[in-house]
Image (cartoon, rainbow, N blue to C red):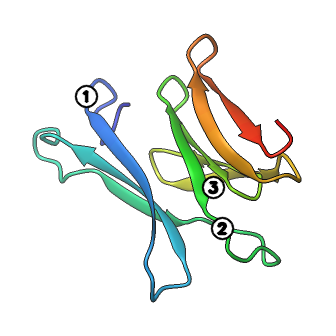
Amino acid sequence: MPVGNSPSYINNLFTFVEKKAADPVTRIHIMEIGNPNAGEAKFKRSAELAYPPDVQGDFPVYVHAVNKYGIIFVITKFGYLFAYEAANAYLLYRQRITDSWIFAAVRNPKTDGMIAINRNG
């Protein structure tokens, strides 16, 4: 994905979600791996994974970056889909996509989308 001030400069980004034991906040981290563009600091962004107030104990089961659009998707166990803009870690979208628990998800190589499997199959 293009990062930094130069739209032609492309580097690899590493994305992960972190929940520390003593911290009630879950965070999504987006950081550059490799050498940054000349004269710039390494790209690094983070944001809180904004769970709805009534959700306790939810956690991500799948993180998927779509390079074409610069969006990072997160699917959680309790069936929430989050979409974050990769350049600034802004939350674009949050919606519950199923009432059943999701236990696995994978990238769909034909559409660059996702396929998630919940308890109901």
Task: Give the foreground label among 2 and 3.
Answer: 2
Residue at which label 2 appears? 50
Who is closer to the viewer here, 68 or 21? 21
Above or below — where is 29 with respect to 108?
Answer: below
Dot 1: what SS?
A: loop
Which amino acid, by three-letter code, is at mark 2? Ala
Which amino acid, by three-letter code, is at mark 1? Tyr
Quadrant of the image for the C terminus? top right
**Residue drawn at point x = 64 percent, y = 15 percent:** 111
**Residue drawn at point x = 78 percent, y = 43 percent:** 118
Which amino acid, by three-letter code, is at mark 3? Leu
**Residue drawn at point x = 20 percent, y = 51 percent:** 42
Residue at which label 1 appears? 9
Who is closer to the viewer here, 105 or 33? 105
The Cα–Cα distance between marks 2 and 1, rounded to whole angstroms, is 31 Å
Judged left or right of residue 26, residue 56 is right
Assess whether mark 3 and mark 1 are in contact (beta carbons under 8 angstroms): no
Pinpoint residue 87: horizontal percent, then vertical percent.
Answer: 44, 45
Q: Which mark is residue 81?
A: none
Assess whether mark 3 and mark 2 are in contact (beta carbons under 8 angstroms): yes
Which is nearer the N-term, disc 2 or disc 3? Answer: 2
Judged left or right of residue 73, residue 10 is left
Pinpoint residue 78: horizontal percent, then vertical percent.
Answer: 76, 59
Count neighbours of disc 1 (C-alpha within 10 A) and say few if under 14, some if 14 to 19, many if 20 or more.
few
Which is nearer the N-term, disc 2 or disc 1? Answer: 1
The Cα–Cα distance between marks 2 and 3, rounded to whole angstroms, is 8 Å
How many labels were placed on the picture? 3
Quadrant of the image for the N terminus? top left
Above or below — where is 69 with respect to 17?
Answer: above
Pinpoint residue 20: horizontal percent, then vertical percent.
Answer: 43, 78
The Cα–Cα distance between marks 1 and 3, rounded to whole angstroms, is 24 Å
Residue at which label 3 appears? 91
